[in-house]
Amino acid sequence: MHYYMTASELAQRIKKKDVSAEETARSFIERIEELDGSIGSFITVEKDRALDTARDIDKKLRQGCELSPLAGIPIALKDNICTENIRTTCASKTLEDFVPSYSADVYERLEKAGCITLGKTNMDEFAMGSSTESSVFKVTRNPWDYSRIPGGSSGGSAAAVAAGMAAFALGTDTGGSVRQPAALCGMVGMKPTYGRVSRYGVVAFASSLDQVGPITRDVRDCALVLNHICGHDRRDSTSMNVAVPDFQQGLEEGIKGMRIGIPSEYFGEGIEQGVRDRVTDAIGVLEDLGAECEEVSLPHTPYALSVYYIISSAEASSNMGRYDGIRYGYRAKDYSDLLDMYIKTRSEGFGAVVKQRVMLGTYALSSGCYEAYYKKAQKVRTLIKADFDSVFEDYDLIVCPTSPFVAFRLGEKTDDPLENSLSDVYTIPANIAGLPALSVPCGFSEGLPVGLQFIGKPFAENTLLRAAYAYEQNTGFHTTHPQVKGGAMQ
Amino acid sequence: MITKEDVEYVAGLARLELTEEEKEEFAKTLGDILEYVQRLEDVDTGSVQTTAHILPLINVYREDEVEPSVDRERILANAPDTLNGCFRVPRVI
């Protein structure tokens, strides 16, 4: 079934003219029409635009133009990535009718490479959440078990790729929002180093943590997508002007002699036995492949979730300040004056989770609390980063679980924000320290996918990809697909 | 411990209006979260510098040159209310 082909394989078929870009796009759109009523990955599907773009690619092929390795590949984008003339909602009532007048840097780059954008995917409202359940538009179901969450916040993107409704997708990762849903849906997900990918045109949640990343079927595709989305952008002042290597280079060199640290803090209380077993098996595989795996310590790990809660909420409360109902977005209908308009607009436009984060962030930044919460969290952030710096003096990378548990049931944890966030305890530290991290499938527990996480040194994505590729090619969990079905949901 | 009055104060700063139900709920959830993050007090950060972001970047400047930007009409197309090429807001004076 070509729905489960990698982007690299699909591109070959299109390039060799075995199949046209238009036929490919049409088949993926039919797949969405068949399945997405059950899964709920997409907020917006751009059928006509996708087919038009695909016909353009076919025309260029017929003319013998040299095309990029991603030409004609059908993709999905998380709905917080601005797409000129395509509605970008952040799964919020606030931006329900927002049609950007400009495009995010990552979207421009993928369009230029000839990717076919099928549509925009569901997410937690403004990316605040870990299960995609805070979307105001719809529920997204895990393709492996429709009674379970796909993870989040990029749950629509991960479910779309897992169910064969897109060859790959982009998500954003503030505390694990690419890696965790990728893990829970059995896909490869990567958060590049902070500064590697431009955030221009990506709706901000927590600006010092946010990073765009790909969700793909395998590690080679992950490298391929990185080749196209990374690079300096002067429109994002936190975009680093560093050389971008060919991420596919050296992928097959193996991991013999590579030094891998296994942080003991990532195997403590709260991890499911099935997850622990699969990750332990995976470490065994890495050793068999010639890596030297040793236990290490990242002693400030128990404080990471607290630091994340304070910093991300503080930055969110500041970023959400722009939704005042004046320049764009929702505006309340009835109000008495300007201040009342702000208040009603925001109170009606934001959902419960967004309000909660804005409240927490406002509190943490308020006079009298700033030192105790925000400044304290920024200091502990320094210590968390120092833990990693110290381990990376002796080791090439760190290996640990991506999530402490497999996908939980819809509605199981929505009431308790702390419990909901516990699924991010192993992904958050890489955001706090700005490090590149990647999740790769490492087997199943109770029939549900488990993710193995690799964390690397700043801008050392190549090392992560090489190790993940060696692991993936020697295990092959990425070749198992969920049994998906269409039809109306019960 | 977060009281209903605390919640009302913070909601005012955040330009939010909460229902009685929301006030009670936020008093509990914010209280729970703040109690959880109390653990940061166990960490000795006496001489530790803060980290605002992790990149070795201080100020990023560009030449102060006029460049074309997005067309005014296209920007205004997303505004809830406009008048004579401007955003329109309720009277403030």
Image (tube, grey):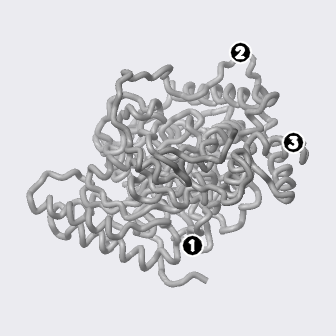
Can you identify the residue that label 3 sits on?
B6
Q: Residue at x 68, y 19 (%)?
A: B48
Can you identify the residue that label 2 sits on?
B47
Chain containing the residue with disc 2: B
User: Decide: marks 3, 1 in contact (CB < 8 A)?
Assistant: no
Distance from label 3 to label 1 (Cα)? Answer: 42 Å
Three-letter amino acid code at disc 3?
Asp
Can you identify the residue that label 1 sits on?
A145
Q: Please state which of residues B54 and B58 is positioned toward the viewer in this rendering.
A: B58
* Quarter holding residue A145: bottom right
Three-letter amino acid code at disc 1?
Asp
Q: Is residue A147 above or below residue A83?
A: below
**At numbered mark 1, what does the secondary structure look like: helix, strand or loop?**
loop
| Horizontal and vertical percent position of residue A427 | 58, 45
- Can you tell which of label 3 and label 2 is closer to the viewer? 3
- The mark that comes first in sequence, 3 or 2, is 3
| Horizontal and vertical percent position of residue A86 | 41, 59
Three-letter amino acid code at disc 2?
Ser
**At numbered mark 2, what does the secondary structure look like: helix, strand or loop?**
loop
Q: Please state which of residues A237 and A477 is positioned toward the viewer in this rendering.
A: A237
- Can you tell which of label 3 and label 1 is closer to the viewer? 3
